[in-house]
Amino acid sequence: MTNGSLSRGDADLANWRTPAHNRWAFGHVDEIIAAAQVDNDPADISPLVLALKGLGDSIVQQAVLRAIRTDAVVALRNGKIVFEWYAPGNGPHTRHILMSSTKAVVGLLAGMLHEAGELDLEAPASTYAPEIATTVYRGATIRNLLDMRTGVVLDPAQERAYKVATNWRPGLADDRDDDLVSFLQNLTAPWKAHGGPFRYVSANTDLLGWVIERAVGLRTPRLLSERLWRPMGAEDPAYFTVDRKGLARCAGGLCATARDLARLGQLIVDNGRRGDRQIVAESIIADIENNGDPGAWRNGEWAKSFSYVSRNMRYRSGWYLVDDRPKTMFAMGIHGQNLFVDRANKIVVAKLSSWKRRTDPLPLWLTHRGFERLRRALIRTPE
């Protein structure tokens, strides 16, 4: 359902992620930041139908969802909608920013290119972007970028420059590296070894996006459209935010509907197939589901803070893997963006939000506990 509307007010590039503005801005990012469309095929939409038995829509559920500033939820079981809810100003066709859940989508795309022989994931990133051969990324492989296992650590000044380069905040008059390529190829600091513990650096995925474009010779939005968005039967076009020279923000700039995000999750449940078409090779999904170094996660920077989710986790190609029973894979972005996939029980939950803070322990905990309760309820419900 769709309720009410929101107004832009004075939302702009300087304030669009603040609590006063993000509820409107996260569903209208292309009105603030330059964007490039990811086309769907309106003549080939994969239908989403309602399950005969859903989960209902109680006042308590709505109160909890509103309390953690949820904007949209779509839950599927066996490819059918069992729960769908939208906050005021949002609806089935609202293209909401996915933030770092984008990394999981780009990770799938990288795997598809590798499977097609167009991208070597074990090669140094400088094979495709030689401009970074003498930077902090010297010797980093594409796999290091995908799994957040580079030795790169940005200092506060570099972090500020990076945010300007993404085109997500205004620059200053003396900003010289105000696009992603300029920023990446001028990123110098004492070199550190790659391949160690998990260390989350969003610039890794923006470098991956540049590498992908160099490898294939196409812009990422067009590539994603041709390889994934159109074949999977997306109902609406998506879009990427782009930097000042048109490079897609692969670390967090994809904007899509909750329904299409759920479709992507269902594609993973279905082993990459849509009907009789193999869209994502089973080997790509198996690699994400079964690989990734538990030790790298355990010794990484987030293991302690995610111990309430599980102590048995991994990170692979932009996806978080929970090795408890039943297993879960999920994508995650700041301000409360998630895609949960339980392949064994054929459950998918897409949740989009506009939390007041980038990361917030209470809504984060409630989100994961809410997914567990929803999963248990679905497993108990006869089909």
Image (tube, rainbow, N blue to C red):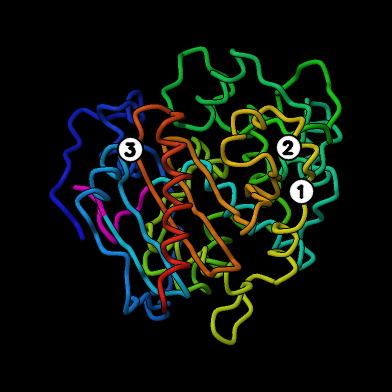
Asked if the residue under mark 1 is in contact with the one under mark 2, i.e. CB atoms within 8 Å, the reply is yes
Q: Residue at x 50, y 41 (%)?
A: 333
- In this picture, residue 272 sits left or right of residue 289: left
Report the front residue among 209 and 252: 252
Tell me residue 22's x, y (percent): 31, 34
- In this picture, residue 312 sits left or right of residue 44: right
Report the front residue among 365 and 152: 365
Mark 3: few/some/many CA within 10 Å (<14, 14-19, 20+): many
Q: Is residue 284 magenta?
A: no
Q: Residue at x 51, y 12 (%)?
A: 174
Q: Which is nearer the N-term, disc 1 or disc 3?
A: 3
Residue 191, picture quadrant: top right
Residue 110 in view: yes
Asked if the residue under mark 3 is in contact with the one under mark 1, i.e. CB atoms within 8 Å, the reply is no
Residue for badge 3: 68
Q: Residue at x 50, y 24 (%)?
A: 164
Mark 2: few/some/many CA within 10 Å (<14, 14-19, 20+): many
Residue for badge 1: 292
Mark 1: few/some/many CA within 10 Å (<14, 14-19, 20+): some
Instruction: Check disc 2 and report its element: helix, strand or loop.
Output: helix
Q: Residue at x 80, y 38 (%)?
A: 295
* Mark carried by residue 13: none
Residue 227 in view: no
Report the magenta residues as a range: 86-96
Report the front residue among 52 and 165: 52
What is the spatial separation of the Cα atoms under label 2 and label 1, in whole angstroms? Answer: 9 Å
- In this picture, residue 375 sits left or right of residue 307: left
Q: Amino acid type of disc 1?
A: Gly
Q: Main secondary structure of the magenta part?
A: loop
Q: Amino acid type of disc 3?
A: Ile
